[in-house]
Image (tube, coloured by chain):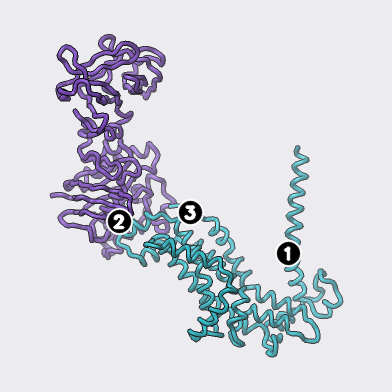
Chain colours: A cyan, B purple
Amino acid sequence: MAEQGKFWRAVVYGSLLIAAVYYLLPLYVMLTTSVKSMEEIRAGNLLSLPLDITFAAWSKAWSTACTGVECTGLQPYFWNSVAMVVPAVAISTALGAVNGYVLSKWQFRGSEVVFAMILFGVFIPFQVLLLPMAQTLGLFGMANSITGLVFVHVVCGLASTTLFFRNYYVGIPDELIKAARLDGAGFWRIFFRIILPMSTPILTVTVIWQFTQIWNDFLFGVVFSSIDSRPITVGLNNLANTSTSVKEYNVDMAAALIAALPTIVVYVLAGKYFVRGLTAGAVKG
Amino acid sequence: MGALAIKNVTKSFGDTDILKGINIDIDAGQFLILVGPSGCGKSTLMNIIAGLEGPTSGEVHIGDRVVNNVAPKDRDIAMVFQSYALYPTMNVRQNIAFGLETRKVPKAEQDEIIARVAKMLQIEHLLGRKPSELSGGQRQRVAMGRALARNPKLFLFDEPLSNLDAKLRVEMRAEIKQLHQRLKTTIVYVTHDQIEAMTLGDRIAVMKDGVIQQFGSPQEIYDSPANLFVAGFIGSPSMNFIPCHIAEQGGVLGVALQGEGEPVFFALPERLNVQGRVGQAVILGLRPEQFDQADAGGVACRIRITEPTGPDTMLLSQLNGRDIIARVHPRHAPAAGELCSLVPDLRKAVLFDPETQTRIG
């Protein structure tokens, strides 16, 4: 019996190990390739460890690689993305929190219908929005600007953020709101003093979710931006597609890692809360 | 002067009538209980008194003013909730202070009030703790402390003890009663527990289906229930309802009770006023303690089950084809399956009309 148990345990761990290696392999290849020189890449094999670690590719990807006609590296795109992501995440999260608060704790006639309609927004494929959104942006004079991209991401993120907060707040007992009302607190005071301090898990989830969505977005970035407002995903695409005489794999890999770095950092810093927030259905009084 | 008056209050959601014309009037310092099964409208009525919901029609008076259009925070009330509703991110001190802060009570005065309330409820050592670090009984005290800090004209308790275990519930019940006697404040207390209703209340309003079935003192409600519902709801084990016919035997009006054998005639007290009802079907209401065991003059009953509770033993049997419970002294209690002679004490018996279910005597 015990022998059999050990055997199956080995099978389980063995398959887990294979799966882990399978998923980690691309990252390994990217990391090692990005610190190799071109000579080594040409000579060596894909899986070998770098003989001579060099960060030249990283430096080139950051500041001198060509993306089309300009050769500025990913640097300007990176800062465009930061300038887009920070306000877009902040605004969509803040609005989602207030929406969720109203839809769960200050229900009005028809609020369930409003919620159902907002929920619908979660399922709309964004491609459908491209044309009407382009017209809207033009109308508001925000076309081809970072402001325009922030606007698009706020609008498109609102459905998810509202859903997150609403579902979290539904688990908070209504009696808390009643008690606060009897204590003399109003709508905003209850929100800022009672509800928001309880929201750390869902705030973390929403911020990570929104950050990942917006940072990794390519569709809106490529459609609604111009030369000086392009986000990093578009920059990366242009960098990888700009054909020179040789394909610089190490620069491409370094660029891809630079583009992915902020989301990885966010997950490492707040991943613990992410899992906790996703599983925290109810709040214990 | 009246502390709380509810006049013809109704509440409807669409076609559903939750409250159908509620009238209640209590004096300052009284302890009013709203009791009834779930769905009877008692919590809705509480919310209307608190101002958390508005009535569809009718008036609510607190003190000498109509408060229909007064916001909850301006009604001079405080409420203790079933879940305690302590703010989870604040410690006990902040929980108590929150209501004082929003009312712009000066800091020094806040500290004074918190110290006084904490001393009264013996929660001084808990002031720095978060609600999650407190036991159920401690949370209950803090919730009461938060209400007391405001020193309101009216206290509202919404099933405050139902989340506590049995032992703690009895302790806290006594404490609430003691607190009321000491502070002499007016309290409205919602519960579905008839023992809490009986032990705590000065006045009890028994509710069902959005209607007050009876409003009176605990003893009135226990001794003279207005209808079958009240009679069955208040008292544990509940009142026995025995179907009978009014009969006349030797010039005396009474009822026949049959257990395991011939029916036995028992005279009804004159108080019940059953002249002119001879031959009519009635329901005889007898509390379990209104039975005695005797060798003679009783009706023979086959005991199906006995339930010893310690001080008393409950005997489950049948009279007139209906299950009954008799509460007897354990020393003489028969065993299950035995025959036993039960003598009903009809001096406190009540009669109900089987059609209208109201008390006729």
Q: Image point 48% across, 54% down: which residue?
A: A282
Badge 2 is on which residue?
A: B53
Q: Which residue is mark 3?
A: A282
- The label nearer to you, 3 versus 2, is 2
Q: Are marks 2 and 1 in contact (CB under 8 Å)?
A: no
Tell me if A16 is positioned left or right of B115 in this view.
right
The residues bearing labels 2 and 1 have C-alpha atoms spaced at a distance of 58 Å
Q: Position of residue A233 (x, y in %)?
A: 64, 77
For label 1, the residue is A24
Q: Chain of mark 1?
A: A
Residue at far right of view: A43
Name which residue type carries label 1. Answer: Leu
* Residue shown at the point (76%, 76%) measured from the top left: A35
Q: Position of residue B83 (x, y in %)?
A: 38, 49
* Lower position in the chain sequence, tag 3 or tag 1: 1
User: How far, Cα to Cα, is label 3 from label 2?
Assistant: 25 Å
Q: Are the residues flagged by discs 3 and 1 in contact, CB closer than 8 Å?
A: no
In the rendered structure, the answer to whether residue B13 lies left or right of residue A57 reads left
- The vertical placement of B314 against A54, above or below, is above
Q: Nearer the viewer, mark 3 or mark 1?
A: 3
Q: Where on the picture, by quarter, is residue B128? A: bottom left
Placement of A223 over or under A210, stated as above or below: below
Q: Amino acid at mark 2?
A: Glu
- Check chain identity for marks 3 and 1: say if they share one: yes
In this view, the residue in front, A58 or A205, is A205
